[in-house]
Image (cartoon, grey):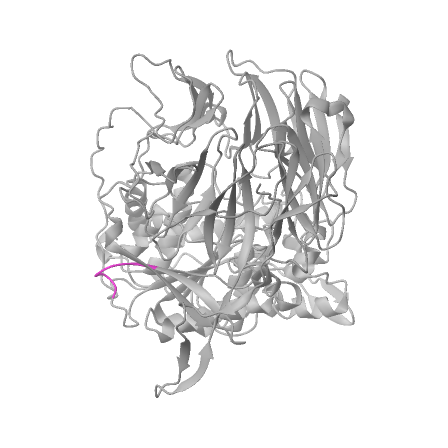
Amino acid sequence: MPHCSLFRSASKCSAWSRFPVIPLRTSSPVAAFFSLPPPLAPPPLPLVASFSHTSVSSSISAATAPSMAKPPTAKKVKHEMEMFGDVRADDYYWLRDDSRSDPDVLSYLKEENAYTDLVLSGSLSDVKQFQDQLYTEIRGRIKEDDITVPIRRGGYYYYKRTLKGKEYVQHCRWRIRDGGTASVFDVMSTGPEASEEQLILDENIKAEGCDYYSIGAFKVSPNNKLVAYAEDTKGHEIYTVYIMDIENGTLLGKPLTGITSYMEWAGDDSLVYITMDEILRPDKVWLHKLETDQSNDLCLYHEKDDMFSLDIQASESKQYLFIASESKTTRFLFYLEILKLESGLMALTPRVSGIDTTASHRGNHFFIKRRSDEFYNSELLACPVDNVTETTILLPHRESDKKLAFGNILIFVLDCQGEEVNEVYVPFSVTLQDFQLFSDHIVVYERENGLPTITVYYLSPIGEPIGRLQNGRTVDFIDPVYSVDPKESQFSSTIVRYSYSSLRTPCSVYDYDMKTGISVLKKIETVLGGFDASSYVTERKWAVASDGTQVPISIFYKKDLVMLDGSDPMLLYGYGSYEVCIDPSFKASRLSLVDRGFIFAIAHIRGGGEMGRQWYENGKLLKKKNTFTDFIACAEYLIENKYCSKEKLCINGRSAGGLLIGAVLNMRPDLFKVAVAGVPFVDVVTTMLDPSIPLTTSEWEEWGDPRKEEFYFYMKSYSPVDNIKAQHYPCILVTAGLNDPRVLYSEPAKFVAKLRELKTDDNILLFKCELGAGHFSKSGRFEKLEEDVFTYAFILKELNMIPLTTS
């Protein structure tokens, strides 16, 4: 049962594509999920040819930018902040305006946008024509008219449809005529004998007249008659929920306003949802009876501790809802029995500092994943519904170890003469991440040595005692680095659905029969334009951090196009916060770099969760600098091993990953040629000292509480805004969203203003603030491509890889 909460996260968005390669070690048959006739191939769009690494146009500098493009200069207003006898001057503090309406602030942001547009998109720029061509190239890989793999719920298949030229999806369903037991070979029949498709909601119509439109939740009632959907038209992640009759499209009652996207049906006539306080902390859970006024809703629980936030999940059995109150280190649970709503919330796991629990239900047992300081890699338990204190261990905690990287083969570090210096071991752990329950099985999702795994276990019949899980069947994958995610499955079936992707394998959806072990490919999303996965290489390498820790790196490039002699351009991505795992997954737009000879790499640095809980613990609080030094170590490894050079190394990170970019730019500006920081969290001390800013109080356990002297000075020592100094910096692009609730737009704005003031080079510095969007940029699927085009054009221009023929 996955759980999530609001934090400064990197959106994990992959381009979905189709490719006829089966990434499983299996001879299983492949069954298409659809009986639709094959679509006609669209006419080929013009693609930009691959280029050698020879300079073909000059890079931009502040001095060589178009003569009429002068970088904006933010005014300075004296503002000082004192803590523990330390005075910090912040002359750009005035850029923070919580109302987003101050004329001076908006004027400055528009000046920055105008300068950026003129440099990269203006009529005087040789990049403009290239950007248009690049957009056509990237969009040309997308099959614009498509549908997702249908999900079977009761008597219907539910799916999303995209239409050619349309930004948003349609939510649709198709009645199942034949019924019967679900099978991995199910096909959604759409022929003349089938029922008609039913269009539930067209987001394209709903988005008309909106600069931003997003549906954060789309929940169909258990009886398949109603749908509740959460709508955001600002990008601020504050939702309005509408309840609609699916058959006739009419709305029931007044919409629910000012809520989160966290909501679940409690039967067919009630909703349970969560609202936020003034700092956007999910703090109250409510029970809403349909067609009653929101003011009459019953508050089931109010979390008053401002370091905790609420979450809600439905069990796979659909008999219980679980309400979680969580901080960054602690998570405890209540349950709500749907057939006994009048009983209210009941305690399931106690509120104990340092213990984190997640739960689901089957038969007469609750199943609980529990992590603690002692059992940091988590254990799986079960307890009777009528006695939640009587627990049985199903999967025990497994200690982390330092295991040899390749079986019994030692890895050695050699000096430049080839002499052995010391043995190197790779940190090894098995971490329980998640689980999924079925009537007869449990599917366990773990991480082993940094890679995701899926293991299926039989469960004893409902009503019988449950013991240790044994003789599990593991699903194998063939790529050296990859991404696996659970998908919605039917509790009563023997089929588990999951998605698989790698840097070279487009997202593939599989149905796995837990009885027979057969995996059936349901869909690989289409990549147009002649994409051939066999032309690409994925690798996994290990860099040695400054303290000797082995840091994994995922690498992706095209065969026969790279030289691997240090002359290749590279884009290195990093994140490293919140225990988030940045698993290697496919993104079609990335091909526009790789097909031009780029090597793409991901540094799986500490602070993330790729290598287990300790990996995260060793990259937070007073160990946060490990995140930055790990990234630098990865960059140095890639340079030393001839994947790139300093003159060709570009780096990228978003949100907390933008903090990473800002920190390493201050620490080692000489190491990089180009840096892109998306919605970066860069004003760490000032933000974390202000509890009125969203996320501050809940994140003291992530970054530290600077009201305490030890944390104050440690956080100040790496906070990007506080460590800008008079030195040369590489070419930099910074982005922001005016309505961003996770990272205030003023943080990147101040970062750019101070960089302009202090940096001693002529390298270009650009700032783009989306005035009608939030943390995740624009909302339309083609609009989102514009951000990739914008970023790639900036990188390619600074590496002199845009041909003069496009000017």
Q: Could you say which is closer to the camera, residue 511 or residue 363?
A: 363
> Would you say 58 lies left or right of 307 here?
left
What residue span does the magenta drawing correspond to? 556-562
Residue 253: quadrant of the picture: top right
**Rendered position, 220 above or below 751:** above
**Displayed quadrant of residue 572:** bottom left
Residue 560 colored magenta? Answer: yes
**Is residue 26 left or right of 98 when viewed as pictured?**
left
Question: Where residue 690 sits in the image (x, y, percent)?
Answer: 73, 54
In front here: 325 or 686?
Answer: 325
Identify which residue, 497 or 794, lies in the foreground: 497
**Residue 272 visible in image:** yes
> From the viewer's perspective, is residue 731 above or below residue 204?
below
Front residue of 584 and 205: 584
x and y, in percent, of residue 518 in the image: 36, 39
In the displayed structure, does residue 683 sit left or right of residue 692?
left
In this view of the protein, can residue 774 be seen by the observer?
A: no
Count of numbered circles in the view: 0
In the rendered image, residue 354 lying in the magenta stretch gets the answer no
- Residue 279: x %, y % from top left: 71, 44
Quadrant of the drawing holding the N terminus: top right
Pinpoint residue 373: horizontal percent, then vertical percent: 68, 59
Horizontal side of residue 450 vs 34, given as left or right: right
